[in-house]
Image (cartoon, helix red, strand yellow):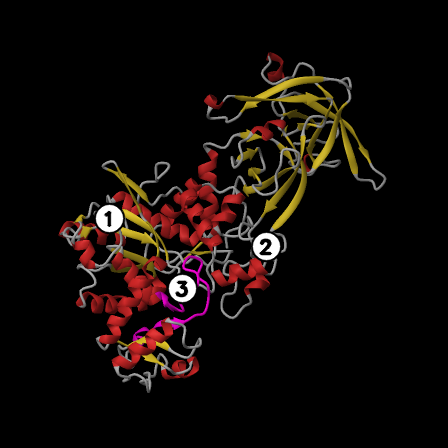
Amino acid sequence: MTEKAPAATHNFIRTQVEADLAAGVHASRRWCGQPGPGSAQAAGQPDPARIRTRFPPEPNGYLHIGHAKSICLNFGLARDYQGRCHMRFDDTNPVKEDQEFVDAILDAVRWLGFAWDHAADGATESNLYFASDYFEQLYQMAEHLVRHGHAYVDSQSAEQMRIGRGTLTEPGRNSPYRDRPAAESLSLLREMRDGLHPEGSHVLRARIDMASPNINLRDPALYRIRFAEHHRTGERWRIYPMYDYAHPISDALENITHSICTLEFEDHRPLYDWLLERLAEGGFFQRPLPRQIEFARLNLSYTVTSKRRLQELVSTGRVEGWDDPRLPTLAGLRRRGYTPEAIRLFCERIGVSRADTWIDMSVLEQALRDDLEARAPRSVAVLDPLRLKITNLPDDHLETCSAPFHPQRPELGRREFPFSRELFIEREDFAIEPPKGFFRLFPGNLVRLRYAHVIRCTGFETDAEGRVSAVLAELMPDSRSGTPGADAYKVKGNLHWVSAAHALPAEVRLYERLFTEPQPGAGDADYLAALNPDSRRLAQAWVEPSALSAPAGQPLQFERHGYFVTDSRDSRPDRLVFNRCVSLKDTRHKG
């Protein structure tokens, strides 16, 4: 971890881990320093890791907030129980995978504050792995399953296999190739490996139980033919393992103790256990075998985390790439201004359970507020500018005002900004005919310009359409903030402002939730119909010069308006672009 993590909340997975440690379930495991079969591990030293977990994404998209929950869980368990968490890519589908996704995933995990390298006793154990590293071993284990009657090559079409698989209420039917002799299946498997058969002509299936009430045990496919170039192995392989085959074997090769996944894999656990038991019987793995434990995935309101839907939003141009600040991808949240600390805090707050529930987006937003409130420097931006002319000052008037970078952190120092004859204020801070309770600027009223002087509104100017184009005011010379005369003025209005001559122009992007419905696409609804047409609004703003000095990626609080950060893609010193991370308060009505 790069920074101190929030205190961990106990949950059922931690209870299981602690019970296993207390019982010494994994105390006899050995580790040869790298993944390998049981014979290699048995020749190694006692495993220095009390537990081993793993974060195993498929490199076919960008990580999202749901992955962050899994990252924090797996790396957090390893951190707290003196273990190791492996970073492993389950890259078994060359059609959808790409090096771009590998690089983006690694960057996101590092940014979130976790590492897969572990230094101890003067050496570093690097636990970055790929399932494709194990392709040869996976294949040899497949041959073993065929030779021992646990797998066979099926030559039915995909449609025939689908029909023969049965339904949730009807058992499946045995394939006519289920009793194919092992020698014939082995010969066909080798021909498949060598590229001698077209895609779809054969698959390797496990021989388990076609009448099982669990469809995942009805002779699932283990290998299929794919004439596709793999991002790491090129065109060496013409067959690729199925995820449900490669995943448990990769866990076992890596000495994983607790294989933690989401609840949709609960029905796959019997297959996970069956495969490892058959291969342990064949001497491939040491015992105890990895144990799969399921938890509820993160369902976050007003967004989608389905890879298919995220891909559709990106490919159809409804958002501007995988890092669009409206998306729940970690790249998008990072660009929006979310911090690693805020995301880790959110994951800690929502906890881990087996209950499939929805978390309101406001919980994530509040975690960001709580993180930024204590450390974001303050500045001022006027988002809807209206010119204010102080008529009793000369045209060249200039003085310097100052304010703390943070009101509760004097050690951060103070910032200085110019005060001149013409300023910009927010248009909503002026009213010709003020409503009841309006304490800001209107003809005859006194207000304080924050950190500066008290002024009295004396009039206003309008343009050809009758719209107010400027407000006129007089300054009270003895009213400057911090001077003895300032206390003589009792005003209720306190306005933000920037000097018209010195403020910096900026494009400000005001982001809202991407969808108008809390569960887009619920039932049979089209999730695209719930897209929020106002999820991004643009404002041509003026910002305090101090905003230019903020380091890239450092969120600021624009007083009154919320937390903002310079856009990592589009902002430049000569063309500032700010993204609103989150408002200062949650003003939405609770439904």
**Which dot, 1 or 2, sits closer to the camera?**
1
Q: Secondary structure at mark 1?
A: loop
**Camera-side residue of 342 and 127:** 127
Magenta-colored stretch includes residue 46: no
Mark 1 belongs to which amino acid? Gly
Look at mark 3 in the image and give the residue it sits on.
Answer: 236
Q: Mark 1 or mark 2: which comes first in sequence?
A: 1
The residue at 26%/67% (across/down) is 141
Q: Which mark is residue 319?
A: 2
Look at mark 1 in the image and give the residue it sits on.
Answer: 33
| Spatial separation of the CA atoms under disc 3 and disc 1 | 27 Å
At which x and y percent is residue 287? 17, 59
Instruction: Give the farthest residue toward the top.
Output: 484
Task: Tell me, yes or no, if residue 73 can be seen here.
Answer: yes
**Camera-side residue of 228 and 97:** 228
Q: Which residues are magenta?
A: 214-243
Q: Mark 2 or mark 3: which comes first in sequence?
A: 3
